[in-house]
Image (cartoon, rainbow, N blue to C red):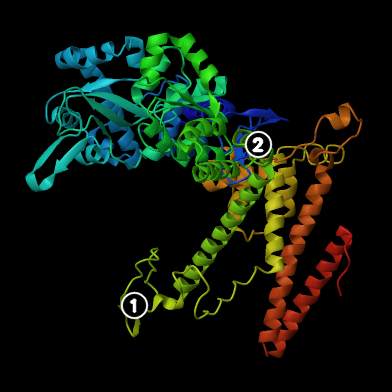
Amino acid sequence: MRLDQETIERIKQAAQVADVIGDYVSLKKKGANLWACCPFHGEKSPSFSVSPAKGIYKCFGCGKAGDSVRFIMDIEGLGYGEALRHLAKKYNITIQESPLTDEQLQAQNARESLYIALNYAKNYYQNNLFQHEEGQSIGYPYFKERGFSDKTIKAFELGYSLDIWDAFTKDALKNGYSIDVLEKAGLTIRKPEENKMFDRFRNRVIFPIHNVSGKTIAFGARILRADKNQPKYLNSPETEVYHKSNILYGIYQAKNAIRSKDVCYLVEGYTDVISLYQAGIENVVASSGTSLTLEQIRLIARFTQNITVLYDGDPAGIKASLRGMDMILEEGLNVKLVVFPQGEDPDSYVQKIGSDAFVQYISDHSSDFITFKAELFLKEAGNDPFKRAELIKDMVGSISRIPDSIKRSVFFQKTASLMQIDEGLLITESNKLALEKVKQKEKDAQRDNNRQRLQSDLPSGITLSTSTNNLPSFDEGMMSFSEEDNFGYEEFGGAPATVLPTPEPSPLPQIANYATTLHEQECIRLLINHGTREVDPAVAPGITLMQYVLGEIDGLQFNTPIYQEMLMLCRQKFLEGTVADTQYFLSHPIAEIQSESINLVAEKHSVSEAWLSKHEIFVPTELDKLADMAYTNILRLKKSFNDDHLSSLMKQLAQTKDPQEQNTLLMQFMQAKEVEKQIAKELGTVVVR
């Protein structure tokens, strides 16, 4: 059901952009705006700006921009309507909607349908735990034995799947969910050849996995009886809404605590997270048994730059996990490590010693990665010089990944002291690694360029395999390639045996056309930012910038599609007796218009108030010179169109041989030249011949 405009406005007014985005990233005030590292691409210096006054965000790195609704759409991958419903739920805004019918469920966007089905499954499993006889006698006692309170069970929405082959599937089908959606959500397994379908999770306690906003996206399930034919833990498969490398268990429950404590505790299992949370240590997430990924590290980086990894006492597991530490360092985060006594893990240890002693243990036993590696491997190396040398190289390799030069210097000093070696040698080794890395990047780039050049020469419809080990064999008409030919390249890595001709570069746009686009952009920028303001109150009171500009460029059609569309919206609103103000464009439902509007409104830099308050230096703003800016822009815009007209006339003159047509074109050309002189005179530029 479509939401009415009044409800949409209520949602947008309640969903303040800084509040909404603050649930996903840690914002810091700088000037009039708030800043953070962008959640949409990896970066180490904040370029993601949030303007509470304008209700928008803008990343000056990747270009992502929008309002609070657009942010939810982008970060959660939701449609417009679903994003509004998400915000309505967050801010307790009631939406009157009829229950979804079977047809409506099937018509839902595929992604939204998965969320709906997964949420239904979560409620079903939780209801089993608390209401069903089997859940109360088997699943619920397991959680109580682990020491989980009802409040904790409900906070993590834990549940139980019945020991019946198709109990959930039958229930979901009865309530209108399609088997296709259930299968795509990873809830039901279907075997068409046997005409069978059954639940993925049976006779297991259920751990729902949530995304950052709290939506259920997958499940982890633990079996409660010994069965050699069954895995102890069973997880949802990858789906359109669940990619295990992108998510951390407990991130929804932990995000606010991580931000406020400014540190994230990273553990391995579900129960570790839940036990620590119940003990009041809420800033904890788990990698869910998978190796730490770059996406997971960047997810943590939205909320803090500090990670403390909590290991159990298993040396083999610790060594296997150290690769992830290098990835954390490379992302510019600060990482510390803690090992618990042999046989203990975070879950058992916090229940054994209590939350206060647990936090104190972390404080007393946390080590930076250099000290940790040294203590872990020095005993193994002993007095063996070769093993010590390998350890030093490994430590230098880790330090070299740190992007901050000061931090690198500090760790080189510490390593030199620990390993009793000259610091200069460590820096030299680091420089060698950096040079090798640069050479490898150049080699990879050369390989990619060679591949692209080769692909451009292949017949249409034939795609070069990405594999460099097993090159394709194919026959296309008269052209035949085989692995032996290797297309004249050595594994696409080194110099080609025969150099293919470099394709001619695409011609750059004509200067006149490019200038026209810039002036069109500036015209729309002025209209969006200042269209409702009086252009010159002293000379023409009551005349808005919108009225003035639209009158001056009446009849002009912009060449750039997006700016022509935005100009049409301005004209349409003006004919209706209103002015399309800044907010109209910033909240426009068409994503391209909204995004471009934010690009034209967002300010990367602002003048400090200290210029006037402390130094008594007045810096004029756009409002102080609005009339001059508008007048100059209109002149330049008309000059660009006139230049385009002149260029067109010259081409026509060169092509025609009809004397009468030549005379007509010459008259038009002379008129256009006269216009050019007049505009140049007004602009104070050199009058062309």
Q: Is residue 567 left or right of residue 446?
A: right
User: Badge 1 local density, few (<14 within 10 Å), some, or many (20+)?
Assistant: few
Q: Disc 1 designates what residue?
A: 482
Q: Which residue is mark 2?
A: 407
Mark found first going from the N terminus, 2 or 1: 2
Are the residues at dot 2 and dot 1 in contact (C-beta closer than 8 Å)? no
Q: Secondary structure at mark 2?
A: helix
Q: Compared with residue 445, is residue 664 higher up or lower down, i.e. above or below?
A: below
Name the residue located 56 percent from the left edge and 25 percent from the top edge.
Answer: 19
Q: Residue at the front extreme?
A: 383
Q: CA distance from mark 2 to mark 1?
A: 51 Å
* Depth order, front residue of 605/571: 605
- Residue 651 quadrant: bottom right
Residue furthest to the left: 194
| One can see residue 457 in this view | yes
Q: Residue at x 74, y 63 (%)?
A: 640
Q: Position of residue 45 (x, y in %)?
A: 64, 39
Q: Amino acid at mark 2?
A: Lys
**Residue 674, position in %: x, y?**
83, 70
List x then y, in percent, for residue 397: 55, 45
* Comparing labels 2 and 1, the label whose residue is closer to the camera: 2
Question: Would you place residue 540 above or below residue 34 in this image?
Answer: below
Q: Position of residue 677 (x, y in %)?
A: 85, 67
Task: State the image quarter where residue 248 is shown.
Answer: top left
Residue 99: tell me if it is visible: no
- Element assignment for label 1: loop
Q: Quadrant of the N terminus?
A: top left
Kind of residue indicated by mark 1: Ser
Q: Is residue 50 left or right of residue 354?
A: right
